[in-house]
Amino acid sequence: MGGSIVAIGMGLSVIGAAIGIGLVGSKAMEAIARQPEAVGDIRSNMILMAALVEGAALIAIVMCFLVA
Amino acid sequence: MYAQNHDHDHDHDHDHQHAGSSHDDHSGHDHSDHAEEFHAPDGHDDAGHANACGLVHDKGEFDPGELAFHHVSDQNVYNIGPLQIPLPCFMWVPKEGFDIFSSGKFNADSHGNGTKAYKKYVLHEGLVQRIPDFPTDDLVDIGHHAVVGVKEMVNDKERTVSYLCYDGKKYKCDDRSTLDFGLFGGGITSFHDLSITKNVLSMGIVVFLLSLLFLKLAKAYRNREGMAPNGMQGLIEPVFVFIQDEVAKPFLGAKWQKFLPFLLAIFFFILGLNLWGQVPFLGGSNVTGSLSVTFVLAIIAFFVINLNGNKDYWKHVFWMPGVPAWVKTILTPVEILGVFIKPMTLMLRLFANITAGHMVLVVFVSLIFVFSKNGLSSIGGYGTVIPSALLSVFMMAIELLVAFIQAFVFTILTASYIGAATEEHHH
């Protein structure tokens, strides 16, 4: 039973990552639609933010490995 | 006779595997050699049979998780497909001294399991383990699959402990010492492994290649002063200028020249190691996916950030100005923790991203073995080859992107922290 609770924890952290990156991506799309000439700036910032959000989720997954 | 049978199966399956699927991109990870285990109809001798000590080497079941874990960990032999390069081992046993030998002495099979024991050391799944109470120091034969990993409860956690069966007696094998205080299943054991492992050799090769590249570039810039960039200059100059203009100058302000070499070194080192681990034909060495390497990078960043912190920085950490006094008492412990947690997140982010990518790739390739039910279902195996290959190629493309992104994110966050530490007071 302990093993499956760890798996549930990992799955929940991935939900957080997916929602976070989805929000970043959607706002970036809106910004590009509003101002298409700023595509380059928006794209690099979007990738940076996505990496940071994903970093938080992956840290959670690594901590799950500690438990089991 | 047993050894002969084993090798015969191994060679047969090696050729069989390559005839069918030439797009198995992970041939460098010697997955082809795992096919030998799944010839259940042929009756591999010791599938589930217990040896003299009652230890069962369970070879019937294929465990993708264990395979993935084996591929992302450090090893004492360098496997490139069927080719095995022995590496020098340099062990320190406290109170007894140093043991220096080549890991070729273990005479390992392609899976990294040694068939000989030497000076109380054995090779199990690519890593050297020590048996403190082994009877002899000489080079003795221990046979195939003599070291067996047994899952048991250690301090209320399920861990895999290795036992060696030799001469009818069961000996417990020690893993090498790690400094993680037992958090990731390690701890201080009877010996410290200071040898040139796969990670160390990969780091050496990548640093050598990077030095060659940049020395050549420096010479080219000196000789071609005022001329347009040519050759490799055209590849590296945009990256260099990107780090200088988008990372160093915005975050570091006036002192960007002082820290630019450090940021570039971090970026190209991490990028080089990430890309080295992505090439399947170089043995798939997972250097940045090992906590030790990323820990050292984070420690270096920690020292650079904090040794360059000016008075304003330390004042903000210990006694944040501009907030009421009771908020200061809450903020001070949080800020002190933040000084340590920020480099730690750098370490964990890089480690987790790269390790997760490697593990997912190994799992995608092992889908073939899972769906073919260890060789029993031919149609399942052949049917999974194309989807698995497509998934693997897609995942490898993502991993290339992740290699660049993670190097960039590490660099930009380090630049941001240094900038925050050296920023002039402008209230």
Image: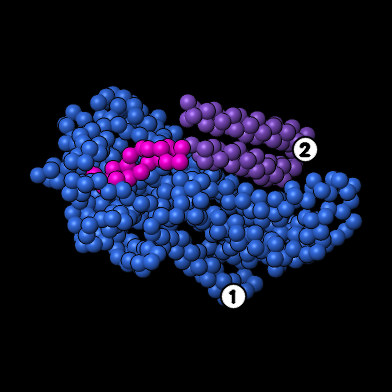
Chain colours: A purple, B blue
Choose top left, top right, bottom left or bottom right for residue B133: bottom left
The reply, left or right, for residue B148 in relation to residue B323 is: left
Residue appearing at x 45%, y 38% in the figure: B157
Q: Residue at x 60, y 33 (%)?
A: A13
Q: How many marks?
A: 2
Amino acid type shown at disc 1: Arg
Q: Is A46 colored magenta in this rendering? A: no
Q: Secondary structure at mark 2?
A: loop
Judging depth in this view, the residue of B5 and B392 nearest the camera is B5
Q: Please state the horizontal and vertical placement of residue A53, each as a whole percent of the image.
A: 65, 39
The residue tagged 1 is: B222
In the rendered image, which quarter contains the N terminus of chain B? top left
Residue extent of the magenta highlight: B145-164
The extreme left residue here reads: B1
Instruction: Report if residue B264 is visible in the image.
Output: no
How far from the left and from the top, in percent, is residue B100?
32, 67
| Of residues B166 and A27, the one drawn nearer to the viewer in this rendering | B166
Q: Is residue B309 above or below residue A22?
A: below
- Which disc, if any, is residue B411? none
* Residue drawn at point x = 41 percent, y = 60 percent: B192
Give the image location of residue B72, x and y in percent.
43, 46
Residue that badge 2 annotates:
A35
Mark 2: which amino acid?
A: Gln
Q: Nearer the viewer, residue A61 or B204?
A: A61
Could you tell me what secondary structure mostly forms the magenta stretch?
Answer: strand
Please give the chain letter of the residue carrying mark 1: B
Crowd band around label 1 with a 10 angstrom C-alpha radius: few (<14), some (14–19), many (20+)? few
Residue B346 point in image, percent of width and height: 61, 50
Chain designation of label 2 = A
| B122 up-or-down from B361: above or below | below
Magenta-colored stretch includes residue B163: yes
